Amino acid sequence: MGDVSELFPLIVRMDEDGELVGDLGLVTKQDLVDVYREMRLLRAFDERAWNLQRQGVIGTYAPFKGQEAAQLGATKPLDDSDWLVPTYRDWAAGYVRGVPVTHGLFFSKGHPRVGDVPKSANVLPAQVVIGAQTLHGVGVAWAAKLKHERTATVVTFGDGSTSQGDFHEAMNFASVFSVPLIFFCENNQWAISVPIERQMRAKTIAQRALAYDMEGYRVDGNDYVAVYNLIAELAGRVRNGEGPFLVEAVTYRLGAHTTADDPSKYRVEAEEERWARRDPISRIEKFLLRESLIDEEQIQAVDVAAKAWVEEVLADFKAELSISSSVLFQSVYAEMPQSLANQFDQYMKRVKEVGA
Ligand SMILES: Cc1ncc(C[n+]2csc(CCOP(=O)(O)OP(=O)(O)O)c2C)c(N)n1
């Protein structure tokens, strides 16, 4: 057997120097100006979230720094009626769909607001059980098919998730029932401290599609233009009854796995530097500068705007943060069952007694 990975060449449209090696396709130059700004805002938020954990304001947070092009490219082409089934790192993707970016902070606090995903966003709650959401994605897409809805579902997951049984079951079900689903793998090279080459012998994740008689694609996940165009095309095909598809977006987690992790223990600086040069934001910036679509002054202005925006969203977050402990009882059922109501009464009596 030949090397099947050769069947899945990396799709690139804008290289790391911001040079077009393909065309912009469906992405306009103005889109790139807007997306550049949006990514900078989201990056500023993500970096601030890290500091909030260090200050003890939030709990464990999984940063998406470095994966902005993959996450925005996978969601910007979707229609309002499409669906996103995300993980704990997909706050930028959720934001595109209309989930407040502070959701990641509420999530880290175990705050009840996290169950409060706006219905119109068509986003499932973020999944922490690795790979489990791939099955949920199949369910959402299958339901759409049974209801004859013309919607595309995108389920996102990391490279490590493809080593899980759930992923393979999901691929099999999706394939057998031809569900309108895009499996979108953010291959950020690491599953916590386990590098991709220790997770699997296959050279690419995309080639795993072959086993399920599915089309697979391997795209530069730090190239917004390439990811956007690929997902736009596949989402259109899915809505027309084709699919499922597997997309491997080759990217890199520039930060730690979570705020509880120290990557200097398991990866070398040279690797981090190599990937920092492929940063999804700086390649758009280089393109915009070369095309005179933005200048240094405007770049500075985005810095200022990003700081102001982060303060604004954090003010909303902080205003909602404090909750009464009674929420623990009230947010479980739509109608509280009698047994829980009894416990709630006892709890409130005790609270009065101790004056809490
Ligand atoms: C079923 C299960 N096993 C183990 C874990 C612990 N765990 C949390 S994140 C993670 C690594 C996931 O790596 P990957 O799928 O590549 O996603 P990434 O975090 O890199 O985005 C593991 C093993 C878990 N959450 N769920």
Image (spheres, rainbow, N blue to C red):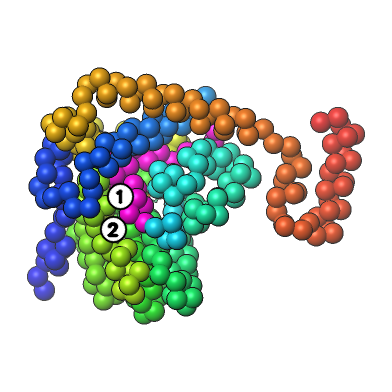
Real-space Cα distance between discs 1 and 2? 7 Å
Query: What's drawn in magenta, residue-wise?
Result: 58-78
Q: Nearer the viewer, residue 347 or 200?
A: 347
**Residue in the image at 16% along x and 55% along y:** 10
Local secondary structure at mark 1: helix
Q: Which residue is mark 2?
A: 231
Label 1 is placed on what type of residue? Gly
Q: Check contact, mark 1 vs mark 2: CB within 8 A.
A: yes
**Residue in the image at 59% along x and 29% along y:** 318
Image position of 220 with respect to 147: above or below = above
| Label 1 vs 2, first from the N-terminus | 1
Query: Magenta stretch: residue 196 in it?
Result: no
Query: Magenta stretch: residue 61 in it?
Result: yes
Q: Is mark 2 within 8 Å of ligand 1?
A: no
**Residue in the image at 52% along x and 24% along y:** 55
Label 2 is placed on what type of residue? Ile
Crowd class of label 2 (few under 14; some 14 to 19; many from 20; radius 10 Å): many
Q: Nearer the viewer, residue 340 or 2?
A: 340
Q: Which residue is mark 1?
A: 73
Where in the figure is residue 183, as x and y percent of width and height? 34, 62
Q: Nearer the viewer, residue 286 or 327?
A: 286
**Secondary structure of the magenta portion, mostly?**
loop
Count of numbered marks: 2
Where in the figure is residue 292, as x and y percent of width and height? 16, 29
Crowd class of label 1 (few under 14; some 14 to 19; many from 20; radius 10 Å): many
- Quarter of the image for residue 229 reads bottom left
Image position of 242 with respect to 253: above or below = below
Quarter of the figure with the C terminus: top right
Quarter of the figure with the N terminus: bottom left
